[in-house]
Image (cartoon, coloured by chain):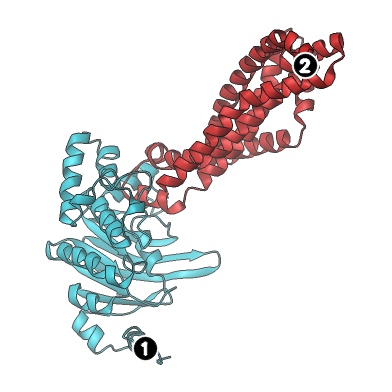
Chain colours: A cyan, B red
Amino acid sequence: MPMIEIRDLRKSFGGLDVLKGISFEVEKAEVVVVLGPSGSGKSTMLRCINLLEDYHSGEVRIDGETVGYRINDGGRRIARPEAENAKVREKVGIVFQSFNLFPHRTAIENVMMGPVHVRHMAKSQARELAGGLLEKVGLADKAHQYPATLSGGQQQRVAIARALAMQPKVMLFDEVTSALDPELVGEVLIVIRRLAEEGMTMIIVTHEIHFARDVSDRIIFMDGGVIVEQGPPDRALASPSSERLKLFLRRYQGDYLAV
Amino acid sequence: MFDVLIGNLTYLLRGAVMTLWLAVAVVTLGTLLGAGIGILAAVGNRIIRGTITAYIFILRGIPVLVVMFLGYYAFPALGLRVNTYVAVGFAQIVYVGAFTAEIVRSAILSVHPEQIAAAKSLGMRRTAILREVILPQAIRIAIPPLLNNALTAIKQTSYASVVGAWELTYAAREVVERTLASFQIFLGVMAIYFAICYPLSLLARWCEKRLMATH
């Protein structure tokens, strides 16, 4: 059974169709990188997986369980209560482009938030878990600093630790290096690659093509709300079959004259 | 020239004590009421939100003096006899509550929606998100305008005098009637109101600095 199953996912904002029928599966321990121009629906698709965005039709399953809706005996789509959605979100970690750390909490308190307030873990135990995770992302010495005093790269690593503290089965990364200064990108990507090596199931939306080649088992290229092409990275990135992916890669590989 | 003020100072200060009591009651209860309503306005359903919006907009559009009179005459009109201070306090609490509610509501809504997304993504439930993520950030935003609101509320207690609640301004008018030294007495009254409000102004400044430092 695949860890993530997405079937004919559709979503629109107002009259604008953002996702026009997305289907793919992600196996356990598989790393899928999603590429695509801005506005192609990548982030929306990612946020539908843990229901931060509602979707209009189709189906998302995590570990076999439907997300957001279930189908009743009459075949009708019934919205799940918020408590059930929260249960699903516990299994799915997400890291955002804009970090979204809690500014009124220190680094370690950010990481403790889920274990303490969702799992109801004792504070001492949560502190130990959080300390270990901060060490894993190389920030043990910043544990008691507030987010505002950390660099972007450090904040993003705290955000990864915060998501990992819930021991998720799946990790989603939504352009996590796009808001970072170039010299800070590496430290975040290294953490993500280590997670991949440990066998975490991941969907990574990124514009870092080299990283995508390096870390992914499969590339999915989205444009205009549909999947245009997918395949293993060496094939998809080296010899793309669609015109749109070719053009996209030319642009992102520094050929600024490519139009 | 100021002998008349010094001679009546004790009387005025007794009025000031009443003003302080009234102010403490109005500010505390008005802020509590407003905070509760403000939170409801931010998280409640459409009907609750609509009702609260009406309350806020109506009270905002009425001068506090008129609210005072309404509050004062409302009880007899309903066949109830209440203490003047209760009537006055009630009217002012309802008035201050509306302004407080608006401050709290907008502070809650100004917490970035991505903060809520981050909390949700950890699996946090509604009440935990409100308690651990939204309110702590909203309070930081709301404290400076709330202190300002409290200052206004304290000064507005002087309107209580028009419906016969004895406090500093009422006491001053009595003294003026007796002594005819209007200017000197009200200069003294001004100084007393200032002395009551100044510490709160300082606190507001101090909070502002502290809050800037942590963000």
Where residue B192 sits: x, y (%)? Answer: 67, 21
Mark 2 vs mark 1: tell me if same chain: no
Residue A227, placed above or below residue A163: below
Depth check, mark 2 against mark 1: the one in front is 2
Residue B196 position, x and y percent, is 62, 23
| Kind of residue at badge 2 | Phe
Foreground: A42 or B182? B182
Helix, strand or loop at mark 2: loop
Q: The residue marked by circle 2 belongs to what chain?
A: B
Tag of residue B2:
2
Q: CA distance from mark 2 to mark 1?
A: 88 Å
Q: With A58 as the anchor, is B24 left or right in this view?
A: right
Q: Which residue is mark 1?
A: A247
Q: Is residue A114 above or below residue A97?
A: above
Residue A115 or B69: which is nearer the viewer?
Answer: B69
Mark 1 is surrounded, within 10 Å at the Cα level, by few (under 14), some (14 to 19) or many (20 or more) other residues, namely: some
